[in-house]
Amino acid sequence: MSEAHVETIERALSAAPSNPEALFDILHEDVEWDYVGAFPESTTYHGPDAVRGFFRNWAGAFDGFGFEAEEVLDAGDSVAVCLRQWGRGKETGAMVENAEQLPRATLSK
């Protein structure tokens, strides 16, 4: 990966709160978004539409959902992203905040 890929991810993540498609538009058509082991209902999502659906469902479970990329790093053949996210659970009312490394994904551009 190059610094250009890091910059592409940074731009997409910066735009995503107001324009989520900015993130999905840069994903390769054969993207595999691997959340195996990350959640009780863990799985691998195949293709931008599946990734889009995952994020729609995930963010939809919270009121005031937000996120911020804390770090975006060139990791050789991929880009590593540490993302902080937060929101209030719609079912429980509990405030949730965590930081995690996003799965590595292939960019289309």
Image: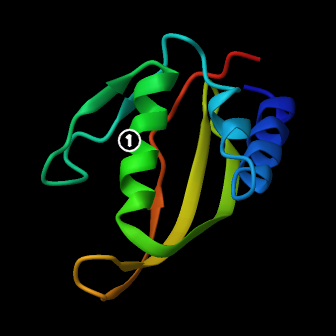
Assign the C terminus to one quadrant of the image: top right
Residue 44 x/y as whole percent: 28, 29
Residue 101 x/y as whole percent: 47, 54
User: Which residue occupies the foreground of this view, 77 or 96?
Assistant: 96
In this rendering, the answer to whether 60 lies above or below 48 is: below
Residue annotated with mark 1:
54
Q: In the image, 9: left or right of 59?
A: right
Residue 35 x/y as whole percent: 30, 41
Circle 1: residue type: Phe
Judged from this view, the residue extending furthest toward the left is 40
In this rendering, the answer to whether 2 lies above or below 72 is: above
Instruction: Please give the name of the residue rendered at 78% of the width and 31% of the height, measured from the top-left corner.
Output: 5
Instruction: Please give the name of the residue rendered at 40% of the width and 71% of the height, measured from the top-left corner.
Output: 62
Kindly indicate the quadrant of the structure image that contains residue 83: bottom right
Q: In the image, 80: left or right of 58?
A: right
Instruction: Please give the name of the residue rendered at 21% of the width and 54% of the height, measured from the top-left corner.
Output: 39
Kindly indicate the quadrant of the structure image that contains residue 71: bottom right
Assign the N terminus to one quadrant of the image: top right
Crowd around label 1: few <14 · some 14–19 · many ≥20 (10 Å): some
Residue 24 x/y as whole percent: 62, 32
Label 1: which secondary element: helix
User: Which residue occupies the foreground of this view, 2 or 60?
Assistant: 60
User: Which residue occupies the foreground of this view, 101 or 57?
Assistant: 57
Instruction: Please give the name of the residue rendered at 46% of the width and 77% of the height, measured from the top-left corner.
Output: 87
**Tag count in the figure?**
1
Image colouring: rainbow
Q: In the image, 13: left or right of 86?
A: right
User: Which residue occupies the foreground of this view, 18 or 14?
Assistant: 18
